[in-house]
Each structure stands twice: as structure tokens, then as C-alpha cells.
Amino acid sequence: MTIELHAIAAPVFTARLKSLVHLLKIAEAEGPARGLSEEAVLGARLASDMFDLKRQVQIATDHAKGAMARLAGIDVPSFPDSEQTFSELYARIDKTLAFVASVPASAVDGRQEAIVTLKLRHETMELKAFDYLQGFAIPNFYFHLTTAYDILRHLGMPVGKRDFLWQE
Amino acid sequence: MTIELHAIAAPVFTARLKSLVHLLKIAEAEGPARGLSEEAVLGARLASDMFDLKRQVQIATDHAKGAMARLAGIDVPSFPDSEQTFSELYARIDKTLAFVASVPASAVDGRQEAIVTLKLRHETMELKAFDYLQGFAIPNFYFHLTTAYDILRHLGMPVGKRDFLWQE
């Protein structure tokens, strides 16, 4: 096998977004026994000036859909950040998984040197697609995914690294 | 450019281990003003049954050196887990960076389908090198790296995602 761009992107997002659903389902089931409402779990954070759990989930999905769109050179789908419940977060993750699956390898492979333009809050960056994926999209994706996990862990939820690496 | 195995491993470990040094240096400098001793910072954790900061750093380096060795089909260097100070952790990260740099692309590239045997606590896994890297080594590396960051954030250290993505 040769290593192609799609294979170092889509399977990573798909596997770990499914792990994220698995983690959230544990939190949803275990919250009530711990005296934690849905709102309390999804609004939990590790520091007062840090994003809460639901926002970590939203941003993780943003990096997954953003990466697949940019690697393919198509528009990034926009999802309103309005989720307030576990059900709504599952729906957002499902929409993201469907979008990732909708971008075929043929639309991505070979585009590792295509220029990706990234509009951030304070700057615009131009990067080769490969560098964008490895140095920006994937680190950001894992950053928000792991922080979601760490929030659950800090809440006392019975999750472990096996759940983070969970696979169907 | 074609995408080769070394290029999706070594630069990731190198860039993010340097970010980790950057994050730890902020924590080392800022601890005293926050009434936190070196021991308190390095012993901090997010849950009582979770590894503390120094152990998160040790395990992150383990996944980096483990991956580079296994991808090249050579022995994984063993580091004793004895670090108790910032200086000792910097030395461990430096040793890891030097090991990552010592494995040339020529020793890794083309080995994506070589079988990696992974001895875990309760099982032995055999995986293709590519799948081991993408599905095990890199997720684990980011998991411990981000958790180290989240511990600093939870301690109130003045770090942000820019520090996590920091580059020389």
C-alpha cells in the first residue's frame, strides 16, 4: 500500500468521533446516579475561562468537517452551535460522520500540496494541505476530544483510556 | 511529494514534544507566584485515580519513542520512570527528541505493512505499522499530551491552545 492523504484523515476522524459518542453515552447514563443533570454535565469545564463540554464536542466536530472539506477543496459545511442536550450532540456528531463519509478518497488523494487558506480570528494562514492536516487539524481535533474526555474524568465519570480508544 | 511513513510520525512527535517543553517551562515559571511548589505542579491530576502530570509526560514520551522504534523494527529504548523535577522531565523529553531524530526516514519508509507486536498489560496485539501508528501510538500520544495541558489549565496556569500548538 502507498499512504494517501485520505487514509491519514478520514479514518482518524471517524474512529475517534465514534469513541466520542461512546464516551458521551456513558456520561449520559451515569450522570443521574452522580446527581449531575444533563445541563451540569454538558456545561462542565476544567477552568472558568475554558470551553465547556458541549463546546469541546462542537469544536472537535468542526475540525473533522473542516479538514475533510479543505483537503477536498470544497466548502466547509456550517453547523449552528446550538446543541444543549446529549441528543443534539449525537445528531451533530452523526452529521459530521456522514459528511466525512461523503468525501471520497478520490476527491482528496494527491492534494497534499494544494494550498489551504485558513481564516483564524487574528490572521489568515496559507498552508500545504498535508501540513495543515498534520500540524493543525489533527492536533486541534485530538486537543478538543481529549479535553472532552478529561472533563468527564474530572466529573468522576467511569471512563478510561480504553473508552477513548474504543472501536466498534 | 508522496506521503511516507516517517513523515506522518517523526515531525508530529518532534513538534508536539517541543510544545510540551514550552508548556512545562511556563508552569515552572508561574508555579511559585501561584503558591504551587514544583512537587505540587508535577503531582497534580484531574481525578484521584488518574496519573499525575509527571506521569502524563513520561507516557507521552513513551509513545513517541515506542512508535519510532516499532516503525523502524528496532528495540524500544527503555527510560526509567524516575523523574521528579522539571529539569529531569526536560532531560527525558530531550532524550526522546534525540531518539526520534536518530531514526532516519530510510529506516521507516515503506514499512507501513510490517507487523508490529504490541505487548499490553492484558493482551498482545499484532497490527500493521500504519494501523498501529494511526490507531494507537498517535491517539495515545495526543491523549497524554493534552491531559498534561489540561492539568496545567486546571491548576490555573496561563496557557492556551496557542501554547499547545507552539512552534519554534
Image: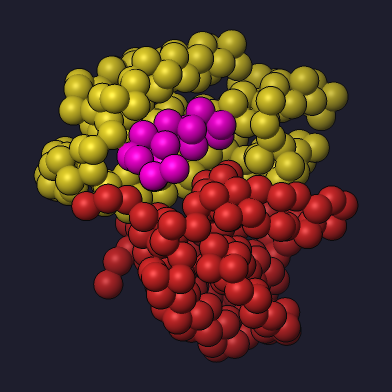
Chain colours: A red, B yellow
In the depicted structure, whether residue B111 falls above or below residue B30: below
Residue A93 place in picture, x, y as percent: 52, 78
> Going by the image, does B81 lie left or right of A82?
left
Question: Bounds of the magenta span?
Answer: B1-16
Residue at the (61%, 74%) spot, across then down: A74
User: Toward which corner of the image does residue A11 lie, by quadrant?
Assistant: bottom left
Residue B143 place in picture, x, y as percent: 47, 47
In the image, residue B159 lies in the stretch drawn in magenta:
no
**Front-lying residue, A158 or A45:** A45
Residue B3 place in picture, x, y as percent: 39, 45
Residue at the (17%, 46%) spot, across then down: B113
In the rendered image, the quadrant that contains the C terminus of chain A is bottom left
In the depicted structure, whether residue A147 falls above or below residue B85: below
**Front-lying residue, B29 or A128:** A128
In the depicted structure, whether residue B160 falls above or below residue B105: below
**Front-lying residue, B2 or A25:** B2
In the depicted structure, whether residue A76 falls above or below residue B95: below
Residue at the (78%, 59%) spot, across then down: A119
Is residue A21 visible in this depiction of the protein?
no
> Going by the image, does B35 lie left or right of A65?
right
User: Toward which corner of the image does residue A71 lie, by quadrant?
Assistant: bottom right
In the image, residue B3 lies in the stretch drawn in magenta:
yes
Residue A106 place in picture, x, y as percent: 39, 70
Is residue A149 visible in this depiction of the protein?
yes
Main SS category, magenta section:
helix
**Front-lying residue, B168 or B144:** B168
Residue at the (74%, 26%) spot, across then down: B26
